[in-house]
Image (cartoon, helix red, strand yellow):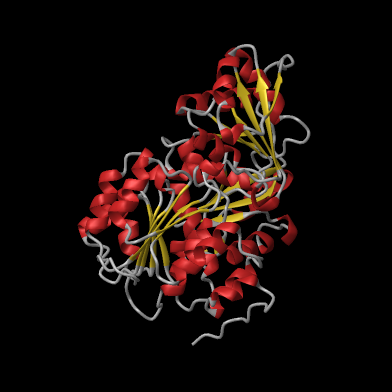
Amino acid sequence: MNTPDNPTPAAPETSAFGAFALAPALLAGLADMGFTEPTAVQALVLPATLAGQDVAGQAPTGSGKTAAYGLSILQLVDTTVQGTQAMVLVPARELVLQVQGALKQLGKHLPNLRVAGYYGGHAMREEVKSMQQVPHVVVASPGRLLDHLERRTLIPNQLKVLVLDEADKLLELGFQEEIATIISRLPRRRQTLLFSATMPDKVLALVRANLTRPRVMNAGGAEASTLPASLTLKGHVVGAADQKPAALYHLVTAPDAGRSLVFANTRDRVEELTRFLRGRGVLAEALHGKMLQPERDKSLMKLRNGSALVMVATDVAARGLDVTELDTVVQYDAPEKADTFQHRAGRTARAGAAGTAHLLVTPPEQSKLQAWPAAANVQWAPLRPAKLPAAAPKAPRATTVTLHVSAGKREKISIHDLVGAFVSIGGLERDAVGRIEVFDHYSFVAVPEAQAEQVLARMQGAKVKGKKVKVALIR
């Protein structure tokens, strides 16, 4: 490989991103998102990536690396050309959606920009149908991208840049063969960017095999043992593993817990803890790899809109979790590796916000974690959890509930359309309409629980943008 008519709103001149000679459309997108100062990884990486160099960057979750490579690839994209010019490989479906959304926001002022997300768990025919308009940028999981390349539904002959994001996790999940096959089918003349929280030998081998004279940069990856200064790390040492459930209950129901993310090492443990918390009156949802995509979307939506206060998840499922204002992280099962500890803790206290990450450990687990530099700032203390309350006689009631609407992007339904319908037909005040998320063939709308039945009754048989929709309460 070698180095490779619509008016745009003016970006504020005070933006420090102006020093990178970015296109005015990208500066406007940054301004819309409230970004005025580049993060450490952006300041380090952008000069090299914008100059067309291959880069292997080590950076932790929440460091701003998506914008670092996103700005670079969007600067390269020519939206007048009908062809896929950039590909981003990520390890999880949620991460596909998160990165796709971030790139769309950054490039919202680029005329006719098309950013597509491809992943398993839903019918491939829907993705093929959407390719009638060729995407300029593709964000995908390795298996699904390889399917498209093999079927030739995606032709990469105009590719300019390939991004391997979360490279350590891609390899950990066993995608080595898929990545090698994908790269063998791409143009050799391209720019390649790789980002990883850690740089084990497998990742370094991937760099050596696929990047040309790369700039290797460390912007605070796991080996740098950096976590946000606004993050408080607390280690709770219980006498035995059977004390952990009670300790978990008291942590997530503390007055200052807010919205919480609980990590477990297995899918079975995720389901077990979710049932346990619900049985004690906690609004909890599960997230793991065996769940179908609509179920995962539903769980994430509930956490984002306040219908749930606790998410219990496996590491892989939570890798692409995009929830702002996440106040508390609890590592129920001790992490196996230092980088896993750091990825988990880094889900809170993002972008300068305050947050607390708790560890629930037995004495042997504590001894293992204390040897990790990344855990050097953990405040350790013994914990004897208080007695558990009796099991709740019925499920708790949320102040906000989520409604399912049987129409989405493919039916040309927008957030604006749904707000209008729930105000004019559903009878809600505009401020009472909560978070709305629109997917391909369905949408989620958050409404006050006290008004949910009335809104449901009014919305039955209603038309949104001329299409009759079904509205149902998500349990």
Q: Quadrant of residue 168?
A: top left
Answer whether residue 170 is visible to the viewer in this image: yes
How many numbered discs?
Answer: 0
Q: Residue 303 placed where, x, y %?
A: 61, 43
Q: Is residue 223 above or below residue 84?
A: above
The residue at 56%/80% (across/down) is: 24
Is residue 120 or residue 206 the one in the foreground?
A: 206
Answer whether residue 103 is visible to the viewer in this image: no
Is 306 placed left or right of 318 in the picture? right
**Quadrant of the frame with the C terminus:** top right
Q: Is residue 56 above or below residue 227?
A: below
Q: Residue 146 placed where, x, y %?
A: 27, 53
Q: Residue 47 placed where, x, y %?
A: 50, 69
Q: Is residue 424 above or below residue 251?
A: below
The residue at 57%/63% (across/down) is: 43
Q: Is residue 10 above or below residue 286?
A: below
Is residue 394 or residue 170 the one in the foreground?
A: 170
Is 202 placed left or right of 266 in the picture? left
Is 75 placed left or right of 361 in the picture? left
Is residue 215 or residue 36 the one in the foreground?
A: 215
View extreme (bottom): residue: 5
Q: Residue 371 placed where, x, y %?
A: 56, 26
**Quadrant of the frame with the N terminus:** bottom left
